[in-house]
Image: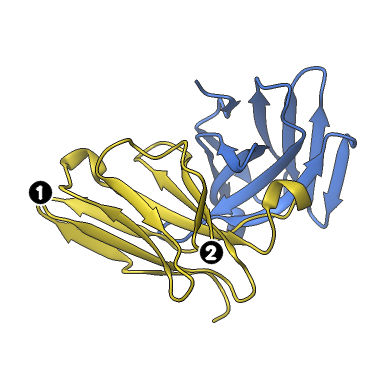
Chain colours: A yellow, B blue
Amino acid sequence: NAGVMQNPRHLVRRRGQEARLRCSPMKGHSHVYWYRQLPEEGLKFMVYLQKENIIDESGMPKERFSAEFPKEGPSILRIQQVVRGDSAAYFCASSPRRGRLSNQPQHFGDGTRLSIL
Amino acid sequence: DQQVKQNSPSLSVQEGRISILNCDYTNSMFDYFLWYKKYPAEGPTFLISISSIKDKNEDGRFTVFLNKSAKHLSLHIVPSQPGDSAVYFCAAWGGNKLVFGAGTILRVKS
């Protein structure tokens, strides 16, 4: 499967725990984007990363949320001390180049559904 | 601030007829638009896009129209098929990211 891979597909955490969501981009793609979808809403941008660099984190909450895309391995979205309001579907997308400059569509993974008890 | 709006939460269409999904935007800096289709428990799948230098783009049964002066775009699906039943998202490139509308649920009845 050469698509964007996200794991786990479902993640259940208790309030106060940490959640780690992983995303492996499509082969040859070095640009990764994270989006969050709350129930009954569209996808909201969180962060845009290239290998080892955060390019735009304007959609990330200021506290508890962090993201990385190391030189080797998948991109990780980390949520510390989770709260009920973090329950959502988190989608990762990738593109081969800086999307806006090439007008490339982003290719999405199937998401991680995070549930907070 | 909802910069991309899809004002119809749902649409029901008979198989074989035309489906028209609408999208409005407020940011005049947007100049590239995309439509994505999403099934439950899956990620969005790219359908079709249009640049602001065009007013129409066609791909098989899917056509997107753009009216820049009205800041409005629409997706036409003809003929509609039951497999088209899904959530359709309109999106615009805004800086480094896609800005999405809230989606329209399309139900195609056979």
Quarter the C terminus of chain B occupies: bottom right
Which mark's residue is nearer the viewer, 1 or 2? Answer: 2
**Total tally of numbered discs in the picture:** 2
Lower sequence index among marks 1 and 2: 1
**Is B74 on the left-hand or right-hand side of A79?**
right
Asked which quadrant contains residue B74, the reply is: top right
Labels 1 and 2 positioned on one and the same chain: yes
Query: What type is the residue that disc 2 sits on?
Result: Lys
Q: Work out whether residue B50 or residue B95 is closer to the camera in this orientation and state it.
A: B95
Residue B48 makes an appearance in the image? yes
**A99 in relation to A111, above or below:** above
Which chain's residue wears label 2? A
Mark 2 crowd level (few <14, some 14–19, many ≥20, 10 Å Cα): some
Residue A54, position in %: x, y? Answer: 49, 51
The residue depicted at 47 percent of the width and 36 percent of the height is A58
Q: Work out whether residue A13 or residue B14 is closer to the camera in this orientation and state it.
A: A13
Residue B10, position in %: x, y? Answer: 51, 35
Q: Work out whether residue B60 or residue A69 is closer to the camera in this orientation and state it.
A: A69
The residue carrying mark 2 is A51
Q: Secondary structure at mark 1?
A: loop
**A52 in relation to A45, above or below:** below
Q: How far apart in space, not on screen, are marks 1 and 2 (Cα)?
A: 29 Å
Q: Secondary structure at mark 2?
A: loop
Residue B85, position in %: x, y? Answer: 56, 52
The residue carrying mark 1 is A16
The residue depicted at 87 percent of the width and 39 percent of the height is B56
Query: What type is the residue that disc 1 sits on?
Result: Gly
Which chain's residue wears label 1? A
Residue A24, position in %: x, y? Answer: 47, 71
